[in-house]
Amino acid sequence: KMARCRGRFVCPVILYKGKHICRSATLAGWGELYGRTGYNYIFSGGSDDAWADAEDISEEDSALRNADSQLFDKVRGHDIKLLRYLSVRYICDLMVENKKVKFGLNVTSSEKVDKAQRYADFTLLSIPYPGCEFFKDYKDRDYTAEGLIFNWKQDYVDAPLSIPVSLTQSLNIDWSEYQSWDLVQQTQNYLKLLISIINSDDDSGLLVHCISGWDRTPLFISLLRLSLWADGLIHASLEPSEILYLTVAYDWFLFGHMLVDRLSKGEEIFFFCFNFLKHITSEEFSALKSQRRKSLPPGFTLEEICMLKQKDRGSTTSLSSDFSLGMESSPGAAGSFTYEAVEKNISEVSCPPGLLSVE
């Protein structure tokens, strides 16, 4: 926990073909790390679990390292052990900055700028994606994502897109044009990349993270879950209303998405997630080589899973008041929702919810 921002450690959330798809926050910077270490020391009666069971450090190594690097070695070492335990190889970083800066201080870091290159054995992908603040522009444009392009020339944006060529060759995407993509194109192309990674022949898992892990991260985890479900590859026994319940409750709210706060600011990334489903119904977004959507009831399309009525779109409370599943055309869907069915499918949600620390 100490290695990651807000204590939000690497957590497996989807089990697919024996691979763990994981989520987390980004790496904690020195300010948060020392702050949490001191807090834990004071309130644990003088016993600091960040230093508990520390491995022996030779006198020669101690002479070469300062206290900062020793602490980072310790906590990030535990983070790396967890990643290896989960067989994670690919780390997809959605941050548009290398380090999050507030009040002139680096408050978070990321694997791609770890000075000691502790994460060099992992395949690091920098796929910068705009934060929740950008989605106020989406709302202000009457919820139109087409033509909405992020301003990559802002001072704080310093993380360029970086993806190993071996992962992009089969996708037929000109990644050099990423700064000219609108929000629809960018989200589509990133989702194609994630689907391609988890469908690779190796047994390696995937980690997706942004800064805190409660806006951009649930967006892509939710889209991945829904896309794989639509292909009948996970949660095959769940009805549309049940998979919706699972992804909203688990991927978004259990991991700390602050919907009320986001709505009050007009940062409607949550609405964008489900409104975006209409853009990923083609075969391009299928993990199957055969025809997709075979698990869906006749007459029911993925874009209908979470349709939102368009009345009163000027209200920031319209998400909660006008939510509709659009289930009328789904035979047998009415009255078929069961919590037992959702709980049964937790076997494919590979982390017990009780292990989470949502702040």
Image: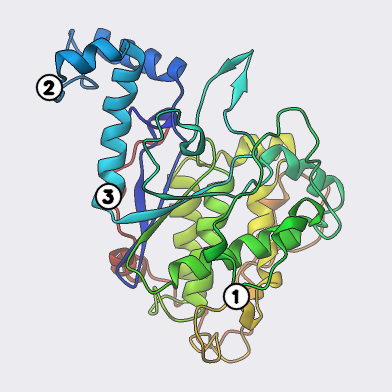
The answer to whether residue 316 is above or below residue 20 is above
Q: Which residue is mark 3?
A: 84
CA gap, disc 1 to disc 3?
28 Å
Q: Nearer the viewer, mark 1 or mark 3?
A: 3
The tag on residue 285 is 1
Residue at 64 percent across and 57 percent down: it is: 273
Nearest to viewer (mark 2 / mark 1): 2
Q: Amino acid at mark 2?
A: Asp
Crowd around label 3: few <14 · some 14–19 · many ≥20 (10 Å): some
Q: Is residue 143 visible?
A: yes
- Dot 3 or dot 2: first in sequence order is 2
Mark toward the start of the polypeptide (2 vs 1): 2
The residue sitting at 30% across, 41% down in the picture is 80
Question: Looking at the image, is mark 1 or mark 3 earlier in the sequence?
Answer: 3
Q: Could you say where residue 115 lies in the image, as x and y percent from the top left?
A: 45, 28
The reply to whether the C-beta atoms of the residues labelled 2 and 1 are less than 8 Å apart is no
In the depicted structure, whether residue 163 falls above or below residue 174: above
Q: Position of residue 174 (x, y in %)?
A: 73, 64
Q: Evaluate whether residue 320 shows in this view.
A: no
**Which residue matches tag 2?**
56
Q: Amino acid at mark 1?
A: Phe
Q: Residue at x 24, y 22 (%)?
A: 50
- Quadrant in the rendering for residue 104: top right
Residue in front for this viewpoint, 162 or 263: 162
